[in-house]
Image (cartoon, rainbow, N blue to C red):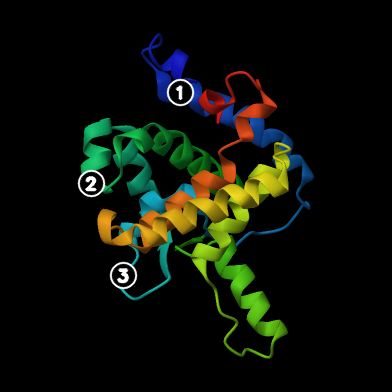
């Protein structure tokens, strides 16, 4: 819709019509004669709402009138205002209006009374589920390990030879560790090197002659 935004004076109306056309199919799938009293909004796309959540809390409650105020603010705001007010990078501000408009139309269609905004996400749920399986003992979560596994999965997806990948990682980290007195870098830089070494050959999936560029 970004191309349309530059050519029409009533972009919000056009965007709303488009969203309504997509919501129509969704609403048909819902059970009839059900009153959806509460709507829970959560997920990474809703990071703009995090400043509304009190410090130390995971959720905040509002009603339809309160969400109307958010909607009216966003639909009349500039990208610079959204960036400053919601502490967002400029690269994300273009997503704010479509996201808020979609939620606004959804709440209107569901005729909900209360809106709950949460900063919890899928990973939080997975952690709780894993802890429950272990009798709510500390399950442990190493973000660095998860990042490395993600890089390995990416390398496997693009058919990187595992023996070459592992050798590259091993030699890279050995060089890093043995030269630490010279470069003076720390754990974060070591992780970045490990990731780079893991995925350094993914570009071969596109073109073996210039794989380093594509990687």
Count of labels in the image? 3
Instruction: Please state, as top left, top right, bottom left or bottom right, where the C terminus lies in the image.
Output: top right
Pointer 2: residues within 10 angstroms few (<14), some, or many (20+)?
Answer: few
The residues tagged by marks 1 and 3 sit, at their Cα atoms, a distance apart of 33 Å
Quarter of image, res 22: top right
What residue is disc 2 on? 85
Quarter of image, res 100: top left
> Residue at position x 69%, y 87% from top?
134
Residue 168 at x, y percent in the picture: 57, 47
Q: Is residue 40 above or below residue 105?
A: below
Of callouts 2 and 3, the N-terminal one: 3
Q: Which SS class for mark 3?
A: loop
Q: CB of mark 2 within 8 Å of CB of mark 3?
A: no
Pointer 1: residues within 10 angstroms few (<14), some, or many (20+)?
Answer: few
What residue is disc 1 on? 13
The residues tagged by marks 2 and 1 sit, at their Cα atoms, a distance apart of 24 Å
Of callouts 1 and 3, the N-terminal one: 1
Q: CB of mark 2 within 8 Å of CB of mark 1?
A: no
> Does residue 56 appear in the picture of this structure?
yes
What residue is disc 3 on? 54
Q: Which SS class for mark 2?
A: helix
In this rendering, the label closer to the viewer, 2 or 1:
2
């Amino acid at each position: 819709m970004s191309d349309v935004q530059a050519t029409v004076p009533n972009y919000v109306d056009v965007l709303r019509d488009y969203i309504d056309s997509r919501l129509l199919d969704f609403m048909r799938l819902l059970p009839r004669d059900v009153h959806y009293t509460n709507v829970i909004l959560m997920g990474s796309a809703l990071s703009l709402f995090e400043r509304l959540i009190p410090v130390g809390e995971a959720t905040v409650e509002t009603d339809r009138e309160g969400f109307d105020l958010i909607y009216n603010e966003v639909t009349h705001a500039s990208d610079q205002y959204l960036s400053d007010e919601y502490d967002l990078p400029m690269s994300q501000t273009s997503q704010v209006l479509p996201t808020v408009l979609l939620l606004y139309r959804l709440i209107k269609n569901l005729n909900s009374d209360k809106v709950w905004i949460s900063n919890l996400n899928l990973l939080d749920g997975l952690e709780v589920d894993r802890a429950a399986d272990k009798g709510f003992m500390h399950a442990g979560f190493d973000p660095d390990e998860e990042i490395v596994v993600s890089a390995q999965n990416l390398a496997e997806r693009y058919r990187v030879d595992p023996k070459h990948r592992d050798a590259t990682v091993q030699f890279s980290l050995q060089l890093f560790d043995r030269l630490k007195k010279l470069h003076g870098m720390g754990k974060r830089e070591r992780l970045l090197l490990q990731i780079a070494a893991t995925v350094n050959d993914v570009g071969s999936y596109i073109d073996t002659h210039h794989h380093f560029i594509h990687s």
